[in-house]
């Protein structure tokens, strides 16, 4: 009986690991203390958070090293902002989908972020209700912008 129970527990552990391996990998970039933890709490049931950085240079380095499926980045960060980091990542051939998570609702910010090749733009107050959907849309190759934000001329 004990042998069967240990086999069941081992099988459960393998299934759990396999599920984690198949989760979409997300890298977070935001310089506000504690905020990446809030983002992680919204995403952790659906995605695997593989790292969190607080500046644009570290974002580039971590994205190249970790090869996330998705990068969720703020705009305003030290060393390189999220826009500059995204431009450099795209030029380097990075295949990660990029979703901006920002406090800025100005249409110029939205347009600029999308012009880098990013596929998503979510404003921080709507993170809990929109970020998972924005990531799913980006993974499908579709653009998601928080409803009500203007970004087209």
Image (cartoon, grey):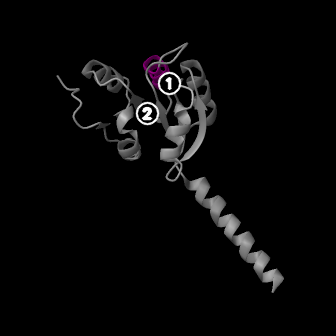
Q: Which mark is residue 98?
A: 2
Q: Does residue 69 appear anywhere in the picture?
A: no
Quarter of the figure that contains the C terminus: top left
Q: Quadrant of residue 16?
A: bottom right
On whether residue 12 falls in the magenta region, the answer is no
Observer-nearest of 136 and 87: 136
Q: Name the side, left or right, on which 125 lies relative to 43.
A: left
Q: Secondary structure at mark 1?
A: helix
In the current view of this chain or complex, which residue is farthest to the left? 153
Q: Quadrant of residue 37?
A: top right
Whether residue 56 is situated above or below residue 49 in the rendered picture: above
In this picture, which residue range is highlighted in magenta? Answer: 82-91
Q: Secondary structure at mark 2?
A: strand
Rounded to the nearest whole Å, what is the CA distance between mark 2 and mark 1? 10 Å
Mark nearer the viewer, 2 or 1: 2
Q: Are marks 2 and 1 in contact (CB under 8 Å)?
A: yes
Q: Quadrant of residue 110?
A: top left
In the current view of this chain or complex, which residue is farthest to the bottom? 1
Q: Label 1, on which residue?
A: 89
């Amino acid at each position: 009986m004990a042998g069967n129970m240990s086999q069941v527990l081992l099988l459960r552990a393998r299934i759990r690991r396999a599920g984690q391996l198949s989760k979409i990998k997300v890298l977070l970039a935001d310089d506000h203390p504690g905020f990446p933890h809030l983002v992680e709490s919204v995403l952790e049931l659906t995605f695997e958070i593989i790292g969190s950085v607080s500046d644009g240079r570290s974002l580039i380095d971590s994205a190249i090293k970790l090869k996330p499926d998705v990068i969720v980045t703020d705009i305003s960060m030290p060393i390189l902002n999220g826009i500059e980091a995204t431009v450099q990542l795209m030029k380097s051939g990075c295949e990660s989908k990029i979703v901006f998570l920002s406090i800025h609702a100005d249409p110029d910010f939205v347009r600029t972020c999308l012009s880098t090749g990013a596929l998503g733009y979510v404003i921080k107050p709507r993170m809990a209700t929109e970020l998972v959907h924005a990531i799913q849309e980006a993974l499908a190759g579709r653009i998601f912008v928080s409803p009500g934000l203007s970004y087209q001329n």
